[in-house]
Each structure stands twice: as structure tokens, then as C-alpha cells.
Image (cartoon, grey):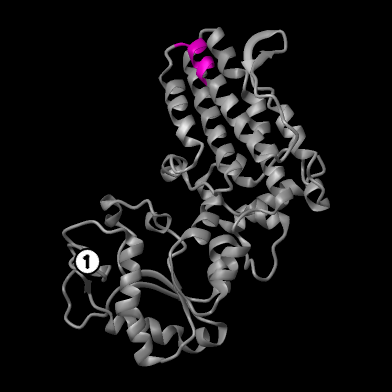
Amino acid sequence: MGDLASRFVPGAVVCRAFYEEAVRPILERHVPGLAHSAAKLHRGSDVLGFDTPQSMDHDWGPANLELFLDDDAYDALATKLTRVFADELPREFRGLPSDLFSMDPDAPDVPGRPVAHRIDCTTIERFMHRAIGINPLVSMTINDWLAITPQYLRAITSGPVFHDGLGSLTQIRERLAWYPDDLWFYLLAAQWRRIDQESPFMARCGDVGDDLGSRLVATRMIDELMKLCFLMERVYWPYSKWFGSAFARLNGATTLTSIFHAILDSRQWREREHHLSAAYRCVADMHNALQLTPFIEPQVVPFHSRPYLVPEADRFEAALYAQITAPDVRALPRYVGALAQFVHSTDVLDRPLRCRALTSMYTHALI
């Protein structure tokens, strides 16, 4: 890799090299043969593989990774290792700063100062509770699934793992790879429901001269259709900054991206409706290709007696719901879905305890 300061290299590649060449040798010197795992799974655009040179201005760099120990080793060694890394890690790695303190241009240069690294010495239990509120190797209920933000499911299942000597990360990634089938059907049905509830409103707004409202509803429908595509392709969606970038990697984006642009570029609501109808037919074809339900005709029809074209999304939601047999999923509020399907506040979705509390409230509501 040579000197990295003169060219951009993805953070996951940099972290892997730093672990292999700087972190692991220190472990071998001080605790040879220590069973451990190393990865970068929590936060950062580099975890998702979307980082660019702009990402290097914060929470990015060689010394940003998690070092997982078993419980006994954590109790005996975590504090020591954190200190050892501060004493022995290089301040610079292949031309990039690995000392966060030295990245501050106003920070004084103090000889012999420990390296301010971000190697998180932790355990699987501690990390998982902090990231998603539960250790999936211990238990995993339907409510647990509903409460976890897809951003963190994506990070944990696809973020870079440099070494898994404990074996736990591999097991967790297998456990969290995708939702159980019946829950998947439930989430798909809920997403079609969200489309069904607003599909006539874009045209209705336009028909009364509210072009801004028409554009706003059309944009909301694009967002809901994109989430439906993520669910159909069994891919967790990331948070808003990388939502479009991640969508572009889906198979459905090949056809839908140009249609979505046409919707957004439309200057009047009937043109907007024409392109939105094409998007509805496209996702209907995608649904039928999954063969999860009997074939459903891809079509758009007038909304009852009104001249606003809709995809009759209730046909898809009902057909999917009919496939659900698991009692714990059937007991959920019909068509509500996972928390992240209807909550958009970062101050909720980034807080596992809040997510779990809110999920418990709506899944146990008797209304």
C-alpha cells in the first residue's frame, strides 16, 4: 500500500493493515496466543464502504476498530491493553495520523504523550448491547428484530472483520443475516401498506393546484418504494446519508433510478403520475419475481371513482399477510411494521433502549 497520505484508500483497508501490522504484533508481544476478534462494525462511513476523502475529517483513520475479548480476558486485560496501545502504537501509519490528538492542529506537542487511539477493547456482549440493545447469540425475539435499526444490522453483518479468533462474530453475522421469513413477509406487507395509504395523494394535491404538495408526496412515495426494494432484495438500508448510494447497488436500481429521476423532474402532476405509475408496475414485477405469493397483476387503476391512478397496493399487502403462519408474528399489530419503517428521528433510531421501549409499547398495544 505504501504511503497513504498522497492518495485515498478506503478506511476498511487502512484499518485492516493497521491491525495486521501494528495492533496484532503488540498483542503477540504482550499476550501471545490471546484469543480475540478484531473488526470495525459500529459507526462510520468506512464501516459501510461508502467513505470518500471527505470522510477523513472525523471518526476515520487507522486506529478506529473494535478488539473483542472473552469475558475473562476482558476483566484481566482490557485496561492494560488500552494503556499498552497508547504507549506503543505509532503516531503515524503509512503517512496517515493514527493519533487522534495529533490531528488537532491546535493541540500542543508534548514529548512522550500517549497515543490517543480509538481501539475499543470490549466483549461481544458489551458491544452488541451498546449497538443494538441485545446479544443475538443469547436470545432473539420478534420484538428484538423490530426494534433494531437497519443501519446497525447492515453495519454488523457487512462491516469489515479482520480476525475472528473467538468465532462469535461469524455466528452473529449468520444469525442477523436477514429477518426470519414470516417476519420478512410482515415487513413487506407493512411497506406495501404505506404505499397504499398515500398513493392517491400526489394526484389529488396536483388536481387542486398544490404543486408543492404533489411534489412532496411524490418524493415520499419514492422513499417508500426504495425501502420496499431493499426489503425485496433482502438488503438492510443505511441511514439517510448513504440511502441513495446503497440503493444504487440494488438490482432494481437499474430500472428504477431513471424513473425516479423522471418523477422528480416532472413539471406537472399528470406527467408525475405517468412516471410514478411506471415505478408501481416495476416494483409489482419485482414482487412477482420473488414468488412469495400467487401472481398479482401489475397494474394501475383509478382510485375508486376518482381519476387518480393507484397500484392497488392492498392486493400485495393482503397476499403477503396471508403467507404468515408464525403465531408471534400474527400477533403483531397488522401492517404496522418495524420501528424504522415509521420512525425517522435519529435521536430514537440511534438509541437502542429507546427503540426497544417504543417497540414494546406499540407491539403490546391493544388497539
Residue at 26 percent across and 71 percent down: it is 99
Residue 63 seen anywhere in this rendered image of the structure:
no
Residue 256: give x, y in percent of width and height.
49, 30
Residue 271 falls within the magenta-colored stretch:
yes
52 to the left or right of 2: right
**In this view, 33 is above or below 39:** below
Q: Residues within 10 Å of mark 1 (few under 14, many from 20)?
A: some
6 to the left or right of 9: left
Q: Nearer the viewer, residue 343 or 255?
A: 255
Task: Tell me which secondary structure the magenta stretch mostly adopts.
Answer: helix
Q: Which residues are magenta?
A: 268-275
Residue 328 falls within the magenta-colored stretch:
no
265 to the left or right of 102: right
Q: Amino acid at mark 1?
A: Leu
Residue 336: give x, y in percent of width and height.
70, 40
**In this view, 281 is above or below 308:** below
Q: Quadrant of residue 86?
A: bottom left
Q: Nearer the viewer, residue 336 or 11?
A: 11
> Label 1's element?
strand
Count of picture labels = 1
Residue at 16 percent across and 59 percent down: it is 6
Per the image, the residue denoted by label 1 is 96
Residue 71 seen anywhere in this rendered image of the structure:
yes
**In this view, 253 is above or below 136:** above
Residue 227: give x, y in percent of width and height.
56, 39
Residue 63: give x, y in percent of width and height.
33, 70
Residue at 56 percent across and 8 percent down: it is 207
Residue at 68 percent across and 14 percent down: it is 303
Q: Quadrant of residue 248?
A: top left
Q: Quadrant of the C terminus?
A: top right
Q: Quadrant of the N terminus?
A: bottom left
